[in-house]
Image (cartoon, grey):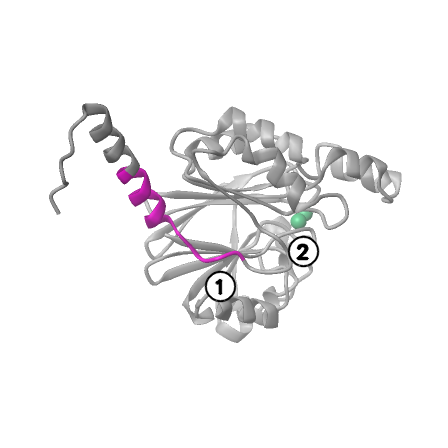
Amino acid sequence: MRYCALASGSNGNCYYIAEGKDAVLIDIGINTKHVEQRMANVGIDPASVKAIFITHEHTDHIRGVTVFCKRYQIPVYMTAGSYRGSRLKLPENLVRIIRGDDEIAVGSLTIRGIPKYHDAQEPCSFLVSNGDINIGVLTDIGRICDNIKHAIRQVDILLLEANYDEELLDTGSYPFFLKNRIRNGWGHLSNRMALETFLEYRTPRLQHLILGHLSGQNNKVELVQQAFSLYCKDIRLSVATRRQETELFDSQFFFVEKHEKHFVHQLCYQGTIVFPES
Ligand SMILES: [Zn+2]
Ligand SMILES: [Zn+2]
């Protein structure tokens, strides 16, 4: 599977996941011009997107949906609550209302909704699978519920929210009510909460952790990297930002690498060198 974050952060989110010719976007929280530019930067054809999934109605997740879905005539999947809350007026033929825990097939991909706690009407995250590899995109999480735990246990690739550094939020300039809205169990995960969650629920199948949805005011890429790098020596670690897209990752490389490492380890252990048959 190929995947990237076209944008990630409190100002805009857009995630691309593809298997062969089938591709989906999760959220379009930046405008269409930027989506197209960033897709071009990593060689993605916007016309390859077969469906758009919306996690909830906050502007940083829907800003570019209307123009993009009309321009490329792509169906938009979202819960009734998210559609109502968004006040979007999308062409009727492109709207697909789903339940928060629905499972939708798009070509060879399956997209499963994960209902979660967040201060929106009917929010859900998504887990995307090709039947073999599971990619979880988990942002805007007020607190860790059983749905989120279950999802993390199933993923090979995880994009997890690390929204704020607790000290920066505490001492920063946000008004008190806004600080509380972020940390009251209906807002976002802090770096510490994300790290604890990752350490507790990750399984050996996890190959790649991407931290995302960083707050522009209350977090820093270096802080996130510092917090996680010590615990990610055996997997790939990336941080996605709102300023530019990540590279277009290909899961194939991780799995080949993992297999080769295992094979070399076995040879060293046995003390003999045998070349693999091709
Ligand atoms: Zn939100
Ligand atoms: Zn958000």
User: Looking at this view, is 120 or 176 the one in front?
Assistant: 176
Question: Which amino acid, by three-letter code, is at mark 2?
Answer: Asp
Chain part drawn in magenta: 246-260
Q: Does the residue labelled 2 lie within 8 Å of ligand 2?
A: yes
Helix, strand or loop at disc 1? loop
Residue tagged 1: 75
Percent across and percent down for residue 132 are: 31, 42
* Of 231 and 66, the residue lying toward us: 231
Task: State the count of labels.
Answer: 2
> Which percent across, then down, holds residue 42?
47, 65
Question: Tag 2: Cα neighbours inside 10 Å, few (<14), some, or many (≥20)?
Answer: many
**Would you name the residue on which mark 2 appears?**
60
Q: Position of residue 95 (x, y in %)?
A: 53, 62
Is 125 rendered above or below residue 41?
Answer: above
- Say which mark, if any, is on residue 20: none
- Residue at 71 percent across and 32 percent down: it is 185
C-alpha separation, residue under disc 2 versus residue under disc 1: 19 Å
Would you say residue 237 is visible in this rendering? yes
Q: Is residue 79 left or right of residue 165?
A: left
How packed mark 1 is, by other alpha carbons closer than 10 Å (few <14, some 14-19, many 20 or more), is: many
